[in-house]
Image (cartoon, grey):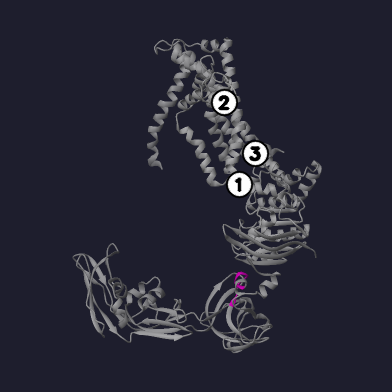
Amino acid sequence: MKKLIQFKNIVKEFDGKLVLKGINLDIYENEFVTLLGPSGCGKTTLLRILGGFLTQNEGQVLFDGQEISNVPPYKREINTVFQKYALFPHMNVYQNIAFGLKIKKEPKDIIEQKVKRMLKLVNLEEYADRSVTEMSGGQQQRVAIARALVNEPSVLLLDEPLGALDLKLRQEMQHELKKIQQEVGITFIYVTHDQEEALTMSDKIVVMKEGEIQQIGTPTDIYNEPVNEYVANFIGESNIIEGVMLEDYKVVFEGRRFDCVDFGFEKNEVVDVVIRPEDLDIVPKAEGKLKGVVKSVLFKGVHYETMVETKVGTEITVKMQVSDDRPVYNESANEKMSANDFYLDMEDVEELDDATIIARADAQAWNPDADELISIKEVQYTIKKENGTYPVTFSTAAGTSVTVNMIVKDENRVTSTENEEEIFAVNFYKKADEIQESIALETDLKTWANASAWSLEDGTAVEISHVKYAFDPETVTPGIYDVTFATKGYEYKVDTTDKYEVGDVVGLSFQPEDIHIMSKGQ
Amino acid sequence: MRQFRSMVYPYVLWIAIMIVVPMLMILLYAFTKEGNSVTTFRFTLENFGRFFRDAVFLDVLKRSLVIAVFTTVVCVLLGYPIAYVIASGPEKSSVFWILMITIPTWINMLVRTYAWVGILQDDGLLNHLLGLLGIGPFHIMYTTFAVVLGMVYNFIPFMILQIHTSLAKMDKSLLEAANDLGANRLQTFLRVTLPLSLPGVLSGITLVFLPAVSSFFIPKLLGGGQYVLIGNVIETQFLTSGDWNFGSAISLIMAIIIMLSMYLTRKVDTDPAANGRRE
């Protein structure tokens, strides 16, 4: 195959911002090439430079071996299908398609012949006389393609042409575009941010990020052997785990040695290990290479997306004392009020303010008829930085008041350190009806227990993703219950056809060729 | 929405008093004789007969139409390139130029026309400047040239604004598409830009032709007493001769001519699209 287009070190900047940072790319004859990347990665800019609508600041564009940077668009053997089609609204379908041929002053009968053929190619034979403004998005799209192809260009540029269409139409058009490309046998350069489109249609995918090419390869190459985390995440879904490459074909992750097909890394190099969700199988736990617990199951149509946790996160368990105290009722003001005792850690005493006390005591006043909350006007307390029980009184403007205890003790704080994370929570009191009425119990439990977690490496907050408890919130009775908070451990996304139940203990199995190793920090 | 409907009534009343009633009065006056007194109506077609029988009036009508058409043509030929240049520049500069074109219209038209008298008269500014260069003096005041100049000056902003609007709202990717399909700049202009800006040109024509054909103070100031256009005739009938009936009849004739020309303009306006569907 012959090199048709060569980009040589293309640099483009807009207002001092580098949009393309030295692109080198060869495109061959009859290829379907896709420039893939998120918006702002420079893919459209590259396409417009090739179309002649922009000029690069540095570098060369060769077409068939000839430098074309100074050739105006209308003299290039390249046609474009624009993002929003850019059909001429004052012309009908036939006139739109014939536009390029009329400009070239081709004889009328030849024009008619060619336009008819194009209408047939894009399945719009009956629409020749239709005004383009009366057509659907999909039809306009076909007109735009026909209008470009009728000029018999050597290259067709397509700038996110399917972006405005709905899912079903988009899938139809993907097949159709591929068919058209094979039929006319010219180079298609296709720009998209949709990885599915890229995988479906392309002979070659160019993954771009922030003005640089990340990887060039066939769809299977890019999918199976992504060069870095960015590509792996952009193309399809993947599980990325940190590992160490012991030697060629041997990798360690999750504390075990696995065979793999990758080589060429340094001894003991720290690497990212990629395993695609569809390459993992769930097997009985004794047969698995890794063992874990099913955390969640999502139905995705053709498969279930099952999350399996192989290593638990950092956990902490606190005591929740449930009481069934009734709210105070102030008949004269028709107000009800409630609050509960709460534990305070010694270190919290200094930072205590009214808002914190109201939140921790969950103090509320309301009108029982209107079911409207009433603001708490006064919070009265004295506290010392010593172990002990300190009363606090909340009252409203109408004089309704409730007194509860703040219990200061140094052993209320529970911390746990594992996985370079620390998690913290305190024991707490709660009333049974509040647990029953909670609409987001897990979030409420986190607030009541003042639970938080952070990384010991850099102090950043870590999400508490699991809240476990053994009581039924609907029918909870007074007593003492355990509540466990945990951060996320190692989780694998697995695509399965069978449905597993949350809590199942399972094994994960995979083959050496399912493991893809990527260098870190590329 | 329903509860606001009653708020429309004041406007309806206003429109009735300020537009409908005067129109009906003109209609009534045009078809009556000595109707200045409301009690003594006598219906007649004599007012129209008088106009069409008299060669002088027909000449005036012809001259008015010729000057209005000429003014409109000059406005299109001058206004289009100006609007095109403004629209193709960057957004900021086009806002500036549109403002520059609009600012003079904030000053009373009569005052600005008087200014031209000072510039154009035999010992005016223009001849003075030309004299410094050793050219002239030219006799410009009270010629057709002066009248057309005054009209073009006064009415061209409407043309530029209309054309600019239609050019500015045009999708720029259409120009790229034409370029991409092999059209050079001239071909792109002729086949895409021009046809798509025609609606703007047509509404510009309407906005220039209407005031041009009925203007009376521009020919009066710049054309002098002897340069009579139809607007002047109507003015004279009402203000000098006191023949309201005849004046109303001429107004009615003008109104019909204008309505006819607007109707024809609309027809041309919708034609390109219709053509598009037929071929």
The span shown in magenta is A232-239
**Residue receiving disc 1:** B171
The chain letter for the residue carrying disc 3 is B
Q: CA distance from mark 2 to mark 3?
A: 38 Å
Residue B278 located left or right of residue B119 = right
* Other-residue count near label 3 (Cα within 10 Å), few / some / many at <14 / 14–19 / ≥20: some
Q: Which mark is residue B194?
A: 3
Q: Is residue B167 visible?
A: yes
Q: Position of residue B119 (x, y in %)?
A: 51, 25
Under circle 1, the secondary element is loop
B202 w.r.t. A449: above or below: above
- Which quarter shows the C terminus of chain A? bottom right
Going 40% across and 71% down the picture, which residue do you hit?
A440
* Mark closest to the chain's N terminus, 2 or 3: 2
Front label number (1 vs 2): 2
Is B176 part of what is drawn in magenta?
no
